[in-house]
Amino acid sequence: MKNLLSAICAAATLLLPGCTPKDPVEARVDELLSRMTLSEKIAQMNQLSGRTDMREAVAGGTVGSILNCVDPAEINELQRIAVEQTRLGIPILFGRDVIHGFRTIFPIPLGLAATFDPALVEQGARIAAVEATASGIRWTFSPMLDIARDPRWGRVAEGSGEDPYLDAQMGAAMVRGYQGGDLSSPDAMAACVKHFAGYGAAEGGRDYNSTMISERSLRNTYLPPFKAAIDAGAATLMTSFNEIDGIPSTGNSFLLRDILRDEWGFDGMVVTDWNSSGEMVAHGFAADLKDATRISVNAGVDMDMMSHGFSAYIEELVREGKISVKSIDKAVGNILRLKFRLGLFDNPYVDASAAAQACYTPEHLQAAKLAAAESAILLQNHGEVLPLENARRILVTGPMADAPYEQLGTWIFDGEEEHTVTPLAALRKRFEVVYVPALAYSRDNSTAHLAEARAAAAGCDAAVVFVGEESILSGEAHSLSSLDLQGSQSQLIAEVRRSGKPVVVVVMAGRPLTIERDLANCDAMLYMFHPGTMGGEAVADLLTGCIAPSGKTPMTFLREAGQVPYYYNHNNSGRPCKGNETLLADIPLKAGQTSLGNTGFYLDSGYGPLFPFGYGLSYTTFVYSNIRLSKQRYGTDETIVVEYDLQNTGHRSGTEVAQLYIRDMVGSTVRPVKELKRFERVSLDAGQSRHLRFELPVSELAFWGMDMQYRVEPGAFRLWVAGDSASGEPVEFEVL
Ligand code: NOJ
């Protein structure tokens, strides 16, 4: 009844003679806002976790959003209380961390990024939305768009890696997938881009740590993915835990007002991260929770996740004149707008009896399998040991071979390991399998069963060793200072190697690990990140050659953790490494101070990475040729057309991710040595050749230069089309 009344009032607002018609949602927001008391407004700004009984809070009208309640019957009941028992009947918005799937778990986001397949990532997000909304969850705290260049940071697992362009493409795809074409559709789930901003630059890779990011670097590197996702329609945004140059993001009005609202025109809703408002006290940026509340609201936060400061202090702060009613109205308007856009007022309930059937459908499982297969990166394949076509009897060993929970990865609150297909289960359907776990879990230091694994390998045609990380070793607050395989996993690989049989290593991990020594002890290595529910089926398809690997590294793979941070799109120093420097083992005694090369290399590990960004092999080979531009000189409003030929020069069909990089040779500020600007997945039969093209508007060469204006600077550029960030010959062009 109350909803009906508010709709009638809103319609009346629309029809007032002499007025320009108002957007219907805005009219409804204004009308509702005009009837709310201050305490009703504050309630909307309060988000609580539904791990405890929420009925009293809802009936008391003290909460606007609940996270972590996933039982559809309970969601309906809480919604009924909100709609029928509170004065204004404003529905609750239910949120959840649906990060890489709800029940059907897809690869971790870093694995999804390795697919370089935004269409598939969008489909995965759509599936997650269909499954989660069937339970009444209409808001996910995803995608995470934090550029991450430090694999020690556990949350690299949750993002798309080190590159702003790839991150932007993946983020926008996820937003489209979650939200669908129409946010008011019952299966649309509002996206939440996070963590705004710079969270992935935590010093030392230690979670929540300080960041030092200049405004230029923020704008050129860290913000573009957020802008892209917001342009794709992202409905909400989450602030980050970290501070940048001394200012915690939850209290940063430059980020939340000047950039987000004024420059980008964002009219969605801003939520804090979990208690990130309250944590400004620990930062030493706010004196107490009340002070933190004042700072957060004035900086531009709309909703508080779990600091309890908004509910406790806003009323007092308004009375004291420290927060204006206008800023409260703005914040509440942003929250109500979202609830109207989601259609929650018109359709607050969910069909609880249909929730379970929405999950694990054959279509969902098939998409999860494809995503897992496309996320696999073939790092090495000596002697074309893969695919395992002639093997009949194989040894399956290692702690990740049959670890249904661990292969799901981090942030899988609603994933159910009973539905996981492990590699062991899937491979048993394709091979005669001898299974020796050898290690109980990834950190297992025991060596008691390694010899058993070697002996078993000796009696097989090939050995497949499944290693990696348990899911708990990556994700939030799970940083590591060593990136080597944990426990006795490297010893297991080395021991199996001694069998003399072909050894294939499959890594399932939450980050790029330092696996150089392990590569030396195997013929082939497939790097999967945590592949999700259907990881086992995907592995079986890859090992048998039903699918050829096509994943590419979304982060640089390093030789040593001591190289961190290392990323392909770095600026040049004045003394870039030449590659002829003298390394540790070759330094003569009493060598002259300047005799080793005098560049920025490590005496022990040289300069280059183990594998560059964008790298990945297939079961076939590809050759790029005839890379040519439509012309040599371009005006700033023109589009560069790059044509190239790509040939599959091997004997199998395969898919290559063709990548276009540019370098701005001279800028008003130093420019990165390479920047990814386009990519495309291209499937080719054995021997097939295709004539292909990329189009790149010159406007996309713009950056924030010396005068902090976003523009293209004229001058010389180089361009590469290649299969990774370290290959290919440049072609040159000029911008006039
Ligand atoms: C803290 C995490 O940083 C954030 O990503 C997540 O969405 C919230 N907790 C809610 O669980």
Image: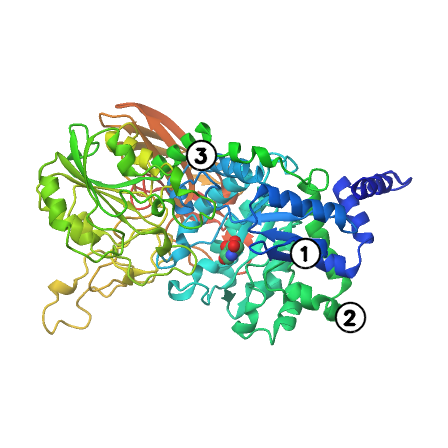
Q: Is residue 276 visible?
A: yes
- Relative to 696, say whether 597 is above or below: below
Identify residue for label 1: 56
Q: Earlier in the sequence, mark 1 or mark 2?
A: 1
Residue 496 in the figure: left or right of residue 274 = left
Q: Is residue 621 visible?
A: no
- Relative to 536, say whether 257 is above or below: below
Give whichever of 48, 724 is nearer the camera. 48
Looking at the rendered structure, the kind of residue marked 3 is Leu
Q: Are marks 3 and 1 in contact (CB under 8 Å)?
A: no
* 3D distance between C-alphas at marks 3 and 1: 42 Å
* 3D distance between C-alphas at marks 1 and 2: 27 Å
* Pointer 3 residue Cβ closer than 8 Å to ligand 1: no
Residue 319 bears which disc, if any?
2
* 3D distance between C-alphas at marks 2 and 3: 51 Å
Residue 672 bears which disc, if any?
none
Please, what secondary structure does the residue beneath circle 1 have? helix
Identify residue for label 3: 120
Give the quarter of the image for residue 426: top left
Q: Residue at x 61, y 74 (%)?
A: 288
Quadrant housing the N terminus? top right
